[in-house]
Image (cartoon, rainbow, N blue to C red):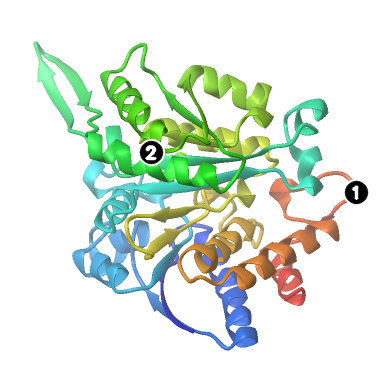
Amino acid sequence: MKKKIGVIRGDCSSPEIVAQTLRVLDRIAEKHGHEFEYTKILMGGEAIDEMGEPLPQSQLELCLQQDSVLLGAIGGPKWEGLPGPMRPEKGLLALRAGMGLYSNNRPAKIWPQLAAASPLKKEIVDKGIDFIIVRELIGGAYFGRHELYENEGELCALDTMPYSEHEIERIGRIGFETAMKRRKKLCMVDKHNVLETSRLWVKVFDRLKKEYPEVEYSTMFVDNCAMQICKDPAQFDVIVTENLFGDILSDEASEITGSIGMIPSSSLGSTKNGLYEPIHGSAPDIAGKNIVNPIACILSAAMMLRFSFDMPAEADEIEQAVNAVLDQGLRTADMMSEGMKRVGTKEMTDAILAQI
Ligand code: IPM
Ligand code: MG
């Protein structure tokens, strides 16, 4: 199969993991007779430096012409002082919105080899951690009205959190469909004791749940959910939630699995053209040192093969290769524990390639 992949190298330590991920994709292409055509696309800090804005229109258009886009991570101290609309993060948000990617899928699954790296007690981890956070990605506070204004001589700021029924319904469907393919449990996380948007989420979900009688549906307040994720993560199968809550909970969920450096993500809309990125940041402090863990990015590429390119066998092969190198005791710095062998970014990828 021939596929066009947009490649956004990202900032700080991100180009290192993207380069390694392309080696893995090349190996898969070679082995299975596929042709992956890469197009370099600028977004984030690199786009600001080279083109003067975080997501130039030409770069968004390039993304829309691809079969999917692979991204590392963007941002870093160099661009910290810039005003809101000029920040690298703004490029990422504009890309998600411009590609219509309303559904962000973030798996929180413990690799048994990394169980010791989880900050949770062994008896909690032993019950199993295997859930998915389905995060609404192009609505809510991220895309509401933002304002900084003056009132009676002092500065005030305002962020609004709008949601409409159709935005809630389409992500709700993804939540229920995801649950149907798994253990058939869906938890909608909100704050309906306080927020009007949450009360609308409840209303829409109460309607939707009738279409999925097999799914065991519940709701949970976001503060309680944050607590339950570290107290009893085994209770969760699929969590569906709005944008900002999903952002926060998915970082927490990744940490309990041992390392945020292991968690990939997919972002999809109404077509198969998706955006695939690790959920971690650009790790500026370790840039250029061959230390950063490439696995979240490599697993993001595997998700791309599975969900956008209908290549489940190829995706399985990558995931099994990762499993094998963890079995061999190889660890990057972020997931190092006693008795394991510490390796760098490139060596970790070499070991993964050796398994494919
Ligand atoms: C994420 C990140 C982004 C977000 C930032 C970089 C804007 O934290 O993908 O979770 O908040 O969505
Ligand atoms: Mg985040």
| In-front residue for pair 132/213 | 213
Three-letter amino acid code of the residue under disc 1: Gly
Mark carried by residue 228: none
**How many labels were placed on the picture?**
2
Image point (90%, 49%), residue name = 339
The numbered dot on residue 339 is: 1
Q: Quadrant of the C terminus?
A: bottom right
Q: Secondary structure at mark 2?
A: helix
Residue 186, horizontal then vertical, whole percent? 51, 33
Type of amino acid at the residue the image marks with label 2: Gly
The picture places residue 18, in percent across and down from the top left corner, at 53, 67
State the residue in front, 199 or 19.
Answer: 199
Q: Is residue 183 in sight in this rendering?
A: yes
The quarter holding residue 242 reads top left
Pair 2/1: label in front: 2
Q: For mark 1, does the 10 Å Cα neighbourhood hold few (<14), some (14 to 19), or many (20 or more) residues?
A: few
Residue 74 occupies quadrant:
bottom left
Rounded to the nearest angstrom, the CA distance separating label 2 from label 1 is: 44 Å
Question: Which residue occupies the extreme right position in the image?
Answer: 339
Which comes sooner in the sequence, label 2 or label 1?
2
> Circle 2 sits on which residue?
172
| Residue neighbourhood size for the residue with mark 2, other residues' Cα within 10 Å, grouped as few (<14), some (14–19), many (≥20) | many
Using the image, determine if residue 42 lies above or below residue 143: below
Instruction: Residue 104 in the image: state x and y as whole percent.
Output: 43, 47
Residue sitting at x 34%, y 62%: 271
Residue appearing at x 30%, y 56% in the figure: 95
Q: Residue furthest left?
A: 152
User: Is residue 136 in view from this perspective?
Assistant: no
With respect to residue 331, does 207 lie above or below? above
